[in-house]
Structure formats: C-alpha cells, structure tokens
Image: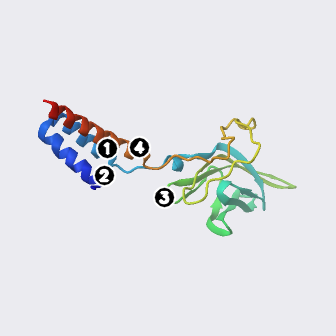
Amino acid sequence: MPGVAGMLRRELALLLRYRPAVAKLVLALVLICSLPITSAAQDTVLMDGEGIFLTTGEAWAFDQGYVLTVKSVNPGTNEVWLELSLDGRILREGIFRERDTLVYSRDTEILNITLDTVYSSPSGELVTFTPVYQYLDPQLPAPEIPDGQEEQDGSNGSQTNSSNDNILPVPGFGMFQALATIILVGLTGLAIHRKR
C-alpha cells in the first residue's frame, strides 16, 4: 500500500494530465504545506509584559523552573548583577543598567526581561523589571494549572484553562489536513473525469 507521499504523487500526475488549472492549485497547496511549521505551543505567552520587583539577594521563580536572581546592586551607578538559572545551572549572568534587557532564547525566545528602575534607600535596594515576557519553552514540560483556579484569574486578567487537560495544539496538524484535502480534491477530479 503506497504511503501518503506516493498517493500524492500519483494524484498530482493524474491532475496534471487531465486538469491543468486544478493541478496548479494543488501544486501551490503542496508548496505551502512544505513550508516550515512552528508549533503554536512555542508562541504561548506565560507572562505578558507584567512587572516584577526584587530586592538585593531575592529571586523570582518563573514557570518551567527558570529563576532570576538579583545578586547585587551598585547604588552609586545603578548597576545590577543579574543571574538567570534553570535547575541550578547558570544560563546568563551579567551587569545590567536601567533600560537594559536580558533576553534568553533557545530555538525561540523564552524570556525577555527589561530592567526598569533601581531604587536605593538606607534599608536596601529595590529593582523593578518591566515589561517581563515569558514564552513557553517547548523543550520543558508545560506548567501545570493549580487546582481550583478559576476560568479567569482576577488578579491580572489572564485566561487560564480550569480543567487539568493541559491541551496544547498538535504541531503540523494543519499540514495533515491540507494533504488530506489535496488528496480529496484529486480523487474528486479523477471521479469527475472518469464519468465523462
């Protein structure tokens, strides 16, 4: 039994022979389907431009295990030593000033954190980060939704799924639908041609 690719080639050959206009449309669909497909999961926003506030020595735990730590602050220059880690392994660290951005990417951007303002007082330093963006890291398990969380979280207005399904889109599913449509169009064209 031929695979999908073999069936597609055979249908395309029949269409080219009997229906040039339909064949061009099918060929265009095949070319579109062969473009790289990105998973919608990679575009899932876990933190959308919110602000976070940390004092010297404090850490912020993001979803999926990422941790941002304010190691130290130089109040004279408003420079901040930041460390980004995952499972105890340092991913990025450096000295940042106000309006500098810490970006962490793998194949896609995962974290985008802008150091907004450094406040100094006799009791210590406070560092504000805004905007802060976190996108789902497809290489790590998706974060779980806590039990009892409402359909809409009233604290920041973000939409959450109240079921425990953790349903994510299937990467490439649109391509399979397009291929099935192409084959169906080919079979329909062949059936019409045979009736003549």
Q: Residue at x 61, y 58 (%)?
A: 141
Amino acid on which disc 1 is placed: Ile
Q: Residue at x 78, y 62 (%)?
A: 57
Alpha-carbon span between mark 3 and mark 1 = 22 Å
Look at the numbered discs 3 and 4 and tell me whether their residues touch, using CB distance below 8 Å: no
Amino acid on which disc 4 is placed: Gly
User: Dot 2 corresponds to which residue?
Assistant: 4
Amino acid on which disc 3 is placed: Asp
Q: Which of the two discs, 2 and 4, labels the residue nearer the N terminus?
A: 2
Q: Secondary structure at mark 4?
A: helix
Alpha-carbon span between mark 3 and mark 4 = 21 Å
Front tag of 3 and 4: 4
User: Dot 3 corresponds to which residue?
Assistant: 107
- In the rendered image, residue 23, in percent from the top left (x then y), is placed at 19, 39
Against 120, is 17 above or below? above
Q: How many other residues sit within 10 Å of disc 2, few (<14), some (14-19) or many (≥20)?
A: few
Q: Which of the two discs, 3 and 1, labels the residue nearer the N terminus?
A: 1
Residue 159: image quadrant is top right
Alpha-carbon span between mark 2 and mark 4 = 15 Å
Q: Depth check: 84 or 1 in front?
A: 1
Asked whether, in this view, residue 172 is left or right of residue 24, the answer is right
Q: How many other residues sit within 10 Å of disc 3, few (<14), some (14-19) or many (≥20)?
A: few
Look at the numbered discs 4 and 1 and tell me whether their residues touch, using CB distance below 8 Å: no
Amino acid on which disc 2 is placed: Val
- In the rendered image, residue 71, in percent from the top left (x then y), is placed at 73, 64
Q: Which of the two discs, 2 and 3, labels the residue nearer the N terminus?
A: 2
- In the rendered image, residue 31, in percent from the top left (x then y), is placed at 28, 46
